[in-house]
Amino acid sequence: MSKSSFLIQPNPDTPGLSQPVEGVNETGMPVTLPVVTEKPITLFLNQQEIVTSMTLGDWVPELAVGYLLNQNMLQRNDEITGIDVDDDLGVVIVRTAHETDFESKMRRKIRTSGCAEGTAYGDMMERFNEIELNNDADFKASWLIELSKAINTAPSLYLSAGAIHGCVLCQQDQPLVYMEDIGRHNAVDKIAGWMFLNNATPHDKVFYTTGRLTTEMVIKTVQMQIPVLVSRSGFTAAAVDLAREARLTLIGRAKGKRFIALSGIGRIVFDSADAADVIESPSHQRAVQRDERQ
């Protein structure tokens, strides 16, 4: 696949996403470092208040639509007539052509392991079991090297400030849409919303995340109908069980040309035996070391 720049990627210099904070280091010397911001956003679906989440405050329409999709409050064939964002009030309203019936979903809410406001609703698993992922999709091991290189060296809040999660929508060895947020579920929802609003097809895509491979990550990837989920972090046993049930290709501990696959191995083409190791930027190495100490 020909190389091109990201369609969307983080801009750590965007005003409002971080702020300088003064302090001291372990020797008592003054330091100033960027710290990411947290903003409450209250989501309404038509007239009904749904949830208030702590978020970076960027890509709010995509976040709102993705959240509703991944909670099955919004269906793929629903018509969105408007999305209103009031930054001063911290409110986003998604309007649809027809009122939706989700009260029962609100009553059957269950918690997941997501940061901040990780929730899944009672009938998510019903749809989960109905989704058939693309069995003809493949994932070349050599693609992981190029993806890791592009993602790990791209400017991001993760590199500049830390305390952030990142998710990337990819196609073959090309990262397309890179979203960040303080909660990994927010980053996933932003990409889900972007895909819906831009009519992006999921069947030939790869989903890359910097965070752990949990049940929430597996459920949302399957909800988006993406057949391959990759992380540089590790797995939970429940996530592996769900991935195998859905026949999702689940790849973790991905670093350079090395990785572990625990589900959907039939999609993987092992073509990178002689490939060179990915080169990580010094800033990325420092960021990973910082996260490992936390």
Image: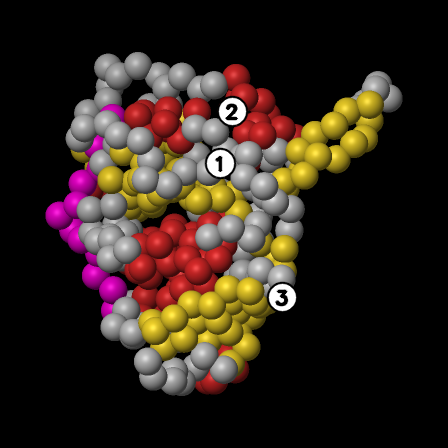
Give the residue at mark 1. 11
Q: Distance between the residues labelled 2 and 3?
A: 36 Å
Q: In the image, 17: left or right of 46?
A: right
Q: Distance between the residues labelled 1 and 3?
A: 24 Å
**Sequence-wise first label, 1 or 3:** 1
Q: Which mark is residue 89?
A: 3
Magenta: main secondary structure: loop
Q: Position of residue 32 (x, y in %)?
A: 74, 28
Q: What residue type is labelled 1?
A: Asn
Q: Which amino acid does label 3 sit on?
A: Leu
**Sequence-wise first label, 1 or 2:** 1
Q: Nearer the viewer, residue 209 or 174?
A: 174
Give the residue at mark 2. 284
Q: Residues within 10 Å of mark 2 (few under 14, many from 20)?
A: some
Q: How far apart are marks 1 and 2 (CA)?
A: 16 Å
Secondary element type, mark 3: loop
Q: Which of 270 and 17 is in front in this view?
A: 17
Q: With respect to residue 81, does 253 lie above or below? A: above
